[in-house]
Image: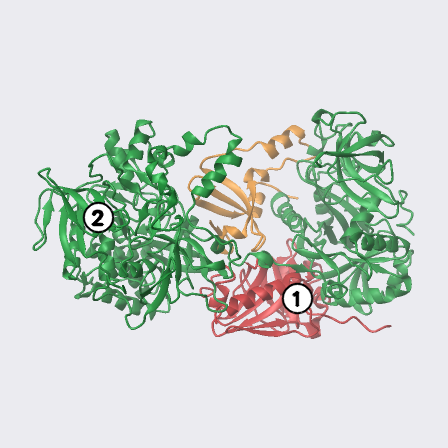
């Protein structure tokens, strides 16, 4: 059985043959086929199972609106669930499998749901999975997840790449049917920058599926000619295989280009898909229209499809879906399917026309005022039951039925900003409403102009109007001749027969019965109807079913359709793969890495790195023989305290602040005073937020009369800079202050320990003796002739300096420091040792600067000057923030030196129950102090300054069971509390 | 969203960082206004459905702070000004 | 005095490297000295005069202007980045300070950035995959800050196939990786 249903003509390339498999069986098709057209050509109608009842299903459509023919495409890590066979472009070697069926598509055990359909009615979820609440997570959800959900992933990592990009245009044309092509041509000829995007791999829209002529040529040929002309225009970008998924604010559109989906494997370096962010000045929606079915019993049988799809398969893909075909229509367009199929030599056995009067097709059994009321054939259509105008019923043997209930303009994107479509009586459907996204207009069938002439005319007119808005004059060329027949539709939504189910939304298995039940239970608003029955909530977003469902609801409630209204649409227009949204931001490429100037050297030493924001910092540097990080860290701490240690501190934010008001400016942004700082000195500064909480801290040096260098924490470098810009532009715009970040311009190293000066003296060209360069000194120096800076500041509590050179010399400087330090047994230490030493010294860092702590909490209350108007000064004095019994920074030691501390543990008095009323505060940072030989911690303790020497419990409530350690509350300055070493 | 930057023309809102209501510009003087006035200024804001003046920072651009007048219902951007100019016009000085 | 300190490029080499990726050539520049120059309040006229005398171009918003020895591009209201040959102007601040005196705030920026020369017959296909700049719509000499690979960059359009890109120095390798990946996808 090789392509038994292929007929003549069409737009497939018969010179080449593709072999592909579906459920393990091999078939043949041609370039130009979709998976659905190729399967239909091979006589395969059954392609899937429905979501809830597991009903056998074949394709309903020939496009992206497809609700039924969802398959798993490819295998292994490239396996992709829920792919619409109707838009999956065939390639050689394509593998597809059916989904939602077990053990096989023809015999699906879950089809038992179909027999149990009375249990699975509207509101089933809400009624069944109600209580007890605890059942949700453990019982109901797993059951639902297993039973529902369509296809599956293999859980292997997707090997393909996905990309993102940005495009700009004057005019974005969405859809390349007759309207879109005309709009693009009109704008392209006027010189405008145009993007024409179409979801299909062949531009031309419906013209490819019709036998209609345009300008005396076959429609498809006319379209190909326009595409050729457009592709020669440098100002026009043609984007086939590209779906506009959403309209966002101010002319921004989300656009997915399927770069390699039509290939077995993407070419090397090419992405599978690209998500484009298109900036358009104007946009025209020329997305065409989607045909809708008419509901009748068992209208979901494989072989029953939309009438327009039936003829698209015949005209474009040269496939006769069945050997005996009937058409059920309520409009003129449905008749085209009958005449086209007959012209192709297919046996058209009947046209069942719901309209009572009018002319009759010649040479075809054309029944007026008739309806299809039932269909037979479980795995594929075998016959239909019709009821004629005189009430007589008859069974007709057919293998395919085309149904047309009219055409719904694809208004979706016009609704993305909540515009409600409006009812058009003439075409019995919704057309774009007012308040569409700014700059977006609709043309062609999307605007309700369903004839070919209407598409050409509105496409041209909308393009001229859109360009006129932009001051671009476009000419109205003579339009080619094209049909302009009215659709002549008589509403027909539901052809009632017996008691069986008639499908509205086939993917989610919403039937007329469900709509009736919703109405009976008073869920009559369209929004309730949608949620209660799940109408339109499947992956197809109800493209074929929505209007049908609400029209039936209108009928049940006695309201008109406009009174009933419609739900609106959200992006994306068609499903988008998660990988496409992620783009290249995954794995190690999730975000860039920032490397420190000593990175290369540290890598050579086998350093362990830690991510600090985007920075990779040295966490510790293991020496041979060290097997545990604590060995390395303890050694680094002890060696630094004993002699000298070197640490890369480049990541700290550095901001150059200049101007005649620089000092006054710093007085505003820091709670302490900087205008009085002497040139050549630095000072620790505390920055508050307006609410009085501490924002950031760091050391700021005065390098000249009007020149300061501020240091921020690594984490807040960006936010502090933003804040300073805010202060100088918005709050005090007359201040003479200029800012520039220099974080990356300087490689900066901390050199700390009793031998720090001796080490630096070997490198620095100037005198840096205590007299020449006292504690908190700052200034320009040269390092072996290279310009640099030196700051005598300490985070570790040791005699310490920070030395900086332009970043390009940073690698040389770390090597020079290590070399010069050999005679002192200098170590290079990482962030862990840095953390140990700062806790030993009682300095606050990220865990204490948590955005909820005041200067008073940190024991730094005296730094807040009330003599000047600094940010946060006023509100830091609020009641509650000045509570003498509020949190204070304390040091914590275990009573038993073997006792272990855990950051995050809570303070409780001895004997107090672990309840919130007794909570005394918490441990913020904990380290092991090799110096003291035990765990130590910092913490915020209520009235902590009054509790020195007290014994309490540190209780880790997160451990199961909770653990606790008896602790002593001590000064946070564990090490050299008098600061004698700093000034050494 | 797109903001029509007064100096640079249309720029994607992705380049900007949002701060909040532009009434934040009316910071009271810390040496004269009390806690109540500061509290009212910092915390009590209108939340209009409609026209709203907002502070945005062009972090990935020219680092200008802007006052954007925007309709919170339609997202229409009605006006974009340099915050520095607005601040000066309000009489903010040093 | 012991030997002086050697220098490393942002990509971690002693000499700048050139990479061919797809149709593009990406060359690290290591010969540019860079400084920010900001006019002090009320001193705009003095800055203009001094700039003219010193041969520092001060282009308008979103523009780069060539000159010798100085070229410059606009970065913010009243602020420019001034470029000069590194060999002659390594301490660029020391060169500029005497010319501008206290009329301007000048800060060395040379090593805050990695600088790439990117060239191809046509750079639009590369840049549209990297940033939201309307490159084909921008004139030659267009200079803007933009985001590439999640981080702020300055992009200067020298021509349809010629761009100078400044990215943050610490993420030079990530930036190059992004450039190369995008360029390779064009092949």
Residue B11 to residue A910: above or below: below
- In the rendered image, which quarter is residue A484 located in? bottom left
Specify the label residue C34 is tagged with. Answer: 1
Residue A218 appears in the rendering: yes
User: Among the chains, which one is red?
Assistant: C
Quadrant placement of the N terminus of chain A: bottom left
- In the rendered image, which quarter is residue A85 located in? bottom left
Residue A261 to residue A425: above or below: below
The x, y position of residue A843, in whole percent, is 80, 44
Residue A487 appears in the rendering: no
Residue A967 to residue A299: above or below: above
**Which residue is drawn at the image coordinates 59% and 37% (left, top)?**
B26
Q: Residues within 10 Å of mark 2 (few under 14, many from 20)?
A: many
Q: Dot 1 lies on which element?
A: strand
User: Among the chains, which one is orange?
Assistant: B
**Pointer 2: what residue?**
A403
In-image side of A337 versus A523 (left or right): left
User: Among the chains, which one is green?
Assistant: A
Circle 2 chain: A
């Amino acid at each position: 059985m090789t392509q038994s249903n292929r007929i003549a003509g069409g737009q497939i390339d018969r010179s080449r043959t593709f072999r592909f498999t579906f459920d393990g069986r091999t078939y043949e098709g041609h370039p130009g086929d979709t998976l659905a057209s190729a399967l239909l050509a091979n006589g395969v109608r059954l392609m899937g199972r429905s979501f809830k009842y597991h009903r056998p299903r074949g394709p309903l459509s020939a496009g992206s609106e497809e609700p039924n023919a969802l398959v798993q495409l490819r295998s292994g890590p490239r396996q992709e669930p829920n792919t619409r066979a109707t838009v999956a472009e065939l390639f050689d070697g394509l593998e597809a499998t059916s989904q939602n069926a077990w053990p096989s598509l023809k015999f699906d055990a879950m089809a038992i749901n179909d027999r149990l359909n009375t249990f699975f009615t509207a509101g089933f979820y809400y009624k069944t999975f109600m209580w007890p609440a605890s059942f949700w997570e453990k019982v109901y959800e797993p059951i639902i997840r297993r039973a529902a959900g369509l296809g599956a992933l293999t859980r292997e990592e997707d090997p393909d790449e996905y990309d993102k990009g940005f495009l700009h245009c004057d005019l974005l044309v969405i859809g390349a049917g007759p309207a879109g092509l005309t709009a693009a041509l009109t704008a392209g000829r006027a010189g405008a920058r145009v993007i024409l995007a179409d979801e299909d791999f062949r531009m031309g829209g419906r013209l490819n599926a019709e036998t209609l002529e345009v300008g005396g040529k076959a429609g498809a040929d006319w379209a190909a000619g326009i595409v050729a002309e457009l592709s020669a225009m440098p100002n026009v970008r043609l984007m086939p295989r590209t779906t506009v998924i959403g309209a966002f604010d101010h002319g921004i559109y989300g656009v997915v280009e399927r770069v390699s989906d039509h290939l077995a494997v993407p070419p090397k370096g090419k992405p599978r898909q690209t998500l484009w962010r298109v900036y358009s000045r104007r946009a025209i929606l020329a997305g065409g229209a989607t045909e809708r079915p008419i509901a009748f019993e068992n209208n979901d049988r494989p072989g029953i499809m939309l009438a327009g799809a039936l003829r698209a398969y015949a005209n474009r893909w040269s496939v006769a879906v069945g050997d005996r075909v009937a058409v059920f229509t309520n409009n003129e367009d449905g008749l085209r399917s009958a005449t086209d199929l007959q012209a192709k030599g297919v046996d058209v056995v009947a046209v069942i026309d719901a309209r009572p009067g009018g002319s009759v097709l010649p040479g075809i059994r054309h029944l007026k005022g008739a309806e299809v009321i039932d269909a037979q054939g479980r795995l594929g259509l075998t016959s239909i039951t019709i009821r004629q105008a005189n009430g007589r019923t008859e069974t007709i043997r057919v293998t395919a039925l085309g149904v047309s209930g009219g055409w719904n303009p694809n208004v979706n994107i016009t609704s993305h900003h909540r515009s409600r479509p409006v009812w058009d009586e003439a075409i019995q459907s919704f057309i774009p409403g007012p308040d569409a996204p700014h700059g977006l207009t609709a043309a062609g069938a999307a605007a309700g102009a369903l004839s070919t002439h209407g598409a050409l005319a509105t496409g041209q007119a909308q393009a001229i109007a859109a360009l006129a808005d932009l001051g671009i004059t476009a000419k109205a060329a003579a339009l080619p001749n094209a049909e302009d027949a009215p659709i002549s539709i008589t509403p027909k939504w539901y052809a009632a027969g017996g008691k069986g189910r008639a499908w509205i939304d086939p993917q989610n298995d919403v039937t007329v019965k469900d709509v009736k039940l919703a109405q009976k239970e008073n869920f009559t608003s369209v929004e309730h109807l949608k949620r209660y029955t799940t109408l339109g909530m499947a992956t197809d977003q109800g493209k074929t079913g929505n209007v049908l469902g609400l029209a039936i609801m209108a009928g049940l409630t006695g309201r008109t359709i406009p009174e009933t209204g419609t739900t609106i649409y959200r992006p994306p227009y068609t499903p988008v793969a998660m990988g496409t949204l992620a783009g290249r931001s995954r794995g190690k490429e999730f975000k860039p890495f920032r490397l420190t100037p000593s990175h290369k050297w540290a890598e050579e030493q086998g350093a362990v790195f830690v991510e600090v924001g985007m920075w990779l910092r040295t966490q510790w540097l293991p020496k041979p023989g060290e097997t545990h990080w604590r060995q390395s860290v303890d050694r680094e701490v002890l060696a630094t305290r004993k002699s000298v240690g070197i640490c890369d501190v480049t990541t700290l934010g550095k901001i150059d602040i200049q101007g005649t008001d620089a000092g006054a400016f710093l007085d505003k942004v820091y709670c302490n005073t900087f205008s009085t700082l002497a040139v050549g000195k630095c000072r620790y500064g505390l920055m508050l937020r307006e609410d009085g909480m501490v924002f950031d801290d760091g050391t700021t040096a005065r390098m000249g009369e009007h020149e300061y260098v501020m240091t921020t924490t690594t984490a807040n470098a960006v936010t502090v800079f933003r804040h300073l810009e805010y202060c100088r532009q918005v709050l005090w715009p007359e201040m003479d202050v200029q800012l520039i970040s220099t974080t990356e311009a300087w490689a900066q190293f901390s050199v700390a320990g009793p031998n720090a000066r001796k080490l630096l003296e070997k490198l620095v060209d100037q005198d840096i003796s205590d007299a020449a360069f006292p504690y908190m000194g700052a200034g320009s120096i040269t390092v072996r002739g290279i310009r640099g800076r030196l700051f005598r500041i300490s985070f570790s509590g040791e005699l310490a300096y920070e030395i900086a050179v332009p970043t390009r010399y940073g690698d040389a400087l770390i090597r020079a420091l290590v070399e010069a330090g050999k005679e002192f047994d200098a170590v290079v230490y990482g962030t862990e040792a840095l953390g140990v030493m700062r806790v030993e010294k009682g300095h606050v860092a990220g865990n204490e600067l948590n955005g909820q702590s005041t200067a008073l909490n940190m024991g730094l209350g005296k730094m807040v000057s009330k003599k000047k108007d600094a940010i946060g000064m006023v509100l830091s004095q609020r009641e509650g923030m000045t509570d003498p019994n509020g949190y204070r920074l304390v040091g914590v030691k275990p009573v038993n030196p073997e006792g272990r501390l855990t950051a995050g543990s809570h303070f409780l008095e001895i004997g107090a129950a672990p309840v919130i009323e007794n909570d005394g505060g918490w441990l913020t940072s904990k380290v092991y102090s090799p110096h003291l030989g035990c765990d130590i911690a910092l913490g915020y303790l209520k009235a902590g300054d009054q509790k020195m020497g007290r014994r309490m419990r540190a209780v880790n409530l997160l451990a199961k069971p909770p653990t606790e350690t008896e602790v002593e509350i001590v000064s946070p300055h564990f090490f050299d509390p008098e600061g004698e070493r700093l000034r050494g | 969203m797109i903001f029509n930057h007064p100096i640079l023309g249309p720029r994607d809102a992705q380049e900007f960082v949002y701060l909040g209501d532009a009434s934040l510009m009316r910071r009271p003087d810390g040496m004269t206004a009390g806690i109540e006035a500061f509290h009212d200024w910092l915390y009590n804001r209108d939340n209009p459905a409609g026209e709203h003046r907002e502070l945005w920072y062009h972090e990935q651009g020219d680092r200008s702070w802007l006052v954007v007048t925007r309709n919170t219902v339609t997202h229409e951007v009605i006006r974009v000004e340099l915050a520095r100019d607005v601040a000066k016009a309000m009489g903010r000085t040093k | 005095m012991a030997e002086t300190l050697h220098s490393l490029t942002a990509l971690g080499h002693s000499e700048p490297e050139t990479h061919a990726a797809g149709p593009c050539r990406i060359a690290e520049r290591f010969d540019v000295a860079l400084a920010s120059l900001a006019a002090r309040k009320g001193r705009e006229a003095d800055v203009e005069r001094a700039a003219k005398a010193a041969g520092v171009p001060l282009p308008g918003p979103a523009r780069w202007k060539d000159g010798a020895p100085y070229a410059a591009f606009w970065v913010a209201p009243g602020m420019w980045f001034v470029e000069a040959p590194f060999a002659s102007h390594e301490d660029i601040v020391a060169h500029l300070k005497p010319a501008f005196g206290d009329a301007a705030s000048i800060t060395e920026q040379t090593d805050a950035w990695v600088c790439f020369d990117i060239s191809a017959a046509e750079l639009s296909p590369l840049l549209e995959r990297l940033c939201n700049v309307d490159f084909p719509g921008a004139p030659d000499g267009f200079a803007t800050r933009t985001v590439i690979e999640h981080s702020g960059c300055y992009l200067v359009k020298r021509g349809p196939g010629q761009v100078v890109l400044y990215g943050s120095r610490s993420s030079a390798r990530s930036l190059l990786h992004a450039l190369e990946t995008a360029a390779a996808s064009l092949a």
